[in-house]
């Protein structure tokens, strides 16, 4: 474990994040067309949609709600993290990496090029990629998707990133070839880890961070996506090592727009403390949102800074 | 209702008069948003023209802010969704000082939903909000299925409803609308009690108590064992409750439960609702209320009905002999409609 001194001071509040896109309410529901639908290996799928003009470009970490056209086997739209955004002839082409596990995503996997799907977005708060420090992107399994997009955005800002990609086994390093080529273009350095040691570092991403961090210029800013257990471990690592960490969370959702209050995540005690007693970004945000106990994944997140959530209570 | 029984020469959709009255409150048209599905009104204002729909029923506000229930709060079921939100809301003070001013600026007809664990809490809310400008009416949430105190079970007592509404009635000049739970033995009892207590209108119905179990983990798919079921799954159930309640009282009804199309809305009106609320459909399609209104207008035009209010209770009027008991309706002539 590296010491606090080596990792450097927590970046000051000059790194205050931009106002949440949801607060400006730029989202729309539009009708999109499937452009690409293909197998992505290890049971995963890649979906690319053509979106009409007027749909704001999502940033890394944001999500959309995908609603199947009627007749659909499910009622509600499905939240899905954006994995790529390209502009072509004035239109947006947006990609998604998903696993067809439930009724909704299985039906989504049946769609063919040309089929219609309704898209609401962009939704939520993405990664604050402009935060000062060495960006370290930490991906677990299919959590790789928004982070490849983040690496590309960092490259456009002429910032080099470290890309830590972990999974249980080498086969679950989803879309590794795609990650390599996109990272090569973005100039990011790829570090692999597998729990079973079948590829790269033998161990989880947090152990890999332990060995990697001393070689990096402090302060570190982590941007992570993956299973909640991994994100909790990354959040704890960041807190213990004086780094900041921004973690993309998941939740069952109904509306995705902050209205139904259906996707609560437990706020940390710091975020719950009264603003005046303990001024902090997290407490300010909690006071503004009006619910000291629960943050909404859809509008307060899905990306949260480690100190905003109570990781012992995150399911 | 068979189309033949109302078929007239089609008229111009622009000539349809959609206005309806709920007590002293005039609505531009019969399409409202359901409480808890449209926030405090401004959340959807960039995609829905609030001045074009009949009105907005705001998220239920309580005296003190409420943090709501622990996750999971929502679970999808066949053609519906269960929720266990637990009345999360910003509380009276912030509602009055922050949310209401924003709504006033939007030129929307606002029906403020209020909820309380006791009659006294409802009195406090009405004393504070009863004369606030920009509120057209109050909907009293007597039917939340997801709170430990002051929920649907507590308010299922007709005597308590009557007494409470009688206490509330003098506190505001604006219409008081009582939102009823469907989970009672006979909704006509609670409907009549509210009418006797001084309610100006009724909303029928709130969500149905429901549950879903994750067998692998042998636990509820919600944070609590049960939640409230909404969406298309409940529409036939809600329609029957609305029809029964409408037949039992003289005050106007607001229909609610699974409405997702113009035809759904018109069915509730034919069954006796003066106006309707679009709820869960908004989660699926943020512009649902606008589309439901357009479809309603189209149907009325195609069927030559110049005033939406003409349709209210048409089914009832044509089936007057079936008003008696639910048993009679079951045995009787509903089949004749087909």
Image (cartoon, grey):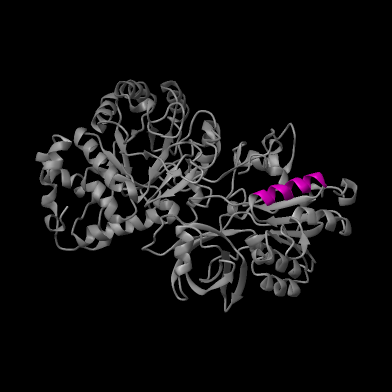
Between B141 and B155, the residue placed more toward the observer is B155
Residue ID at (63%, 41%):
A288
Decide if residue A133 is on the left or right side of residue B276: right
What range is drawn magenta here? A229-241
Decide if residue B106 is on the left or right side of residue B310: right
User: How far from the left and from the top, in percent, is residue B120?
Assistant: 44, 21
**Residue B62 seen in the figure:** yes
In the image, is residue B13 part of the stretch drawn in magenta? Answer: no
Between B322 and A23, the residue placed more toward the observer is B322
User: How far from the left and from the top, in percent, is residue B83?
Assistant: 45, 42
User: How far from the left and from the top, in percent, is residue A106?
Assistant: 47, 63
Magenta region's main secondary structure? helix
Residue ID at (28%, 48%):
B19
Q: Is residue A293 above or below residue B160?
A: below
Q: Is residue B155 above or below residue B108?
A: above
Between A262 and B48, the residue placed more toward the observer is A262
Q: Is residue A87 above or below residue B173?
A: below
User: How far from the left and from the top, in percent, is residue B44?
Assistant: 48, 52
Q: Residue furthest right?
A: A5
Quadrant in which the C terminus of chain B appears: bottom left
């Amino acid at each position: 474990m590296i010491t606090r001194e080596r990792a450097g001071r927590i970046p000051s509040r000059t790194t205050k994040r931009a106002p949440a896109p949801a607060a400006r309410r730029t989202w729309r529901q539009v009708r999109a067309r499937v452009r690409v639908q293909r197998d992505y290996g290890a049971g995963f799928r890649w979906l690319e949609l053509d979106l009409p003009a007027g749909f704001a470009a999502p940033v890394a970490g944001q999500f959309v709600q995908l609603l199947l056209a009627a007749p659909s086997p499910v009622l509600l739209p499905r939240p899905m993290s954006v994995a790529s955004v390209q502009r072509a002839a004035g239109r947006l082409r947006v990609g998604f990496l998903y696993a067809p596990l439930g009724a909704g995503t299985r039906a989504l996997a049946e769609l063919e090029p040309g089929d219609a799907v309704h898209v609401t977005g962009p939704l939520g708060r993405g990664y604050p990629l402009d935060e000062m420090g060495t960006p370290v992107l930490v991906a677990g399994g299919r959590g790789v998707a928004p982070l490849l997009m983040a690496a590309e955005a960092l490259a456009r800002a002429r910032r080099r990133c470290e890309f830590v990609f972990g999974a249980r086994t080498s086969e679950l390093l989803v879309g590794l070839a795609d990650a390599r080529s996109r990272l090569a273009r973005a100039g990011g350095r790829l570090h692999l880890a597998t729990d079973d040691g079948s590829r790269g570092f033998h161990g989880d991403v947090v152990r890999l961070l332990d060995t990697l961090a001393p070689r990096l210029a402090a302060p570190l800013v982590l941007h992570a996506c993956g299973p909640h257990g991994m994100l909790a471990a990354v959040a704890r690592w960041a807190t213990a090592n004086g780094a900041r960490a921004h973690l993309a969370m998941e939740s069952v959702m109904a509306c995705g727009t902050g209205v139904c209050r259906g996707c609560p995540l437990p706020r940390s005690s710091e975020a719950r403390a009264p603003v005046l007693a303990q001024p902090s970004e997290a407490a300010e945000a909690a006071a503004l949102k009006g619910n000291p106990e629960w943050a909404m994944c859809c509008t307060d997140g899905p990306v949260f800074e480690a100190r905003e959530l109570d990781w012992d209570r995150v399911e | 209702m068979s189309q033949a029984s109302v078929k007239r020469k089609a008229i111009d959709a622009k000539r349809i008069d959609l206005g309806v009255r709920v007590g002293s409150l005039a609505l531009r048209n019969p399409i409202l948003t359901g409480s808890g599905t449209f926030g405090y009104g401004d959340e959807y204002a960039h995609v829905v023209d609030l001045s074009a729909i009949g009105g907005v029923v705001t998220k239920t506000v309580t005296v003190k802010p409420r943090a709501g229930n622990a996750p999971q709060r929502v679970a999808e079921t066949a053609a519906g969704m269960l929720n266990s939100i637990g009345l999360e809301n910003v509380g009276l003070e912030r509602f009055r000082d922050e949310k209401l001013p924003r709504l006033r600026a939007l030129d929307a007809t606002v029906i403020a939903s209020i909820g309380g664990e006791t009659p006294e809490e409802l009195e406090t809310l009405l004393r504070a909000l009863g004369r606030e400008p920009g509120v057209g009416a109050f909907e009293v949430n007597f039917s939340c299925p997801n709170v430990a105190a002051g929920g649907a079970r507590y308010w299922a007592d007709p005597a308590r409803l009557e007494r409470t509404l009688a206490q509330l009635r003098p506190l505001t000049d604006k219409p008081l609308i009582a939102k009823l739970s469907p989970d009672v033995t006979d909704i006509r009892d609670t409907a009549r009690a509210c009418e006797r207590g001084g309610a100006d209108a009724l909303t029928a119905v709130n969500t149905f108590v429901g549950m879903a179990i994750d067998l692998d983990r042998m636990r509820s798919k919600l944070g609590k064992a049960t939640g409230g079921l909404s969406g298309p799954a409940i529409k036939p159930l809600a329609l029957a409750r609305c029809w029964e309640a409408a037949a039992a009282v003289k005050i106007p009804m607001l229909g609610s439960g699974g409405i997702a199309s113009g035809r759904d809305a018109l069915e509730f009106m034919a069954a006796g609702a003066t106006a309707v609320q679009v709820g869960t459909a908004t989660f699926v399609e943020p512009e649902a209320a606008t589309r439901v209104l357009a479809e309603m207008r189209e149907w009325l035009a195609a069927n030559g009905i110049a005033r939406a209010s003409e349709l209210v209770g048409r089914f009832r009027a044509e089936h007057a002999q079936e008003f008696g008991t639910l048993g009679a309706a079951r045995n009787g002539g509903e089949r004749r409609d087909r």
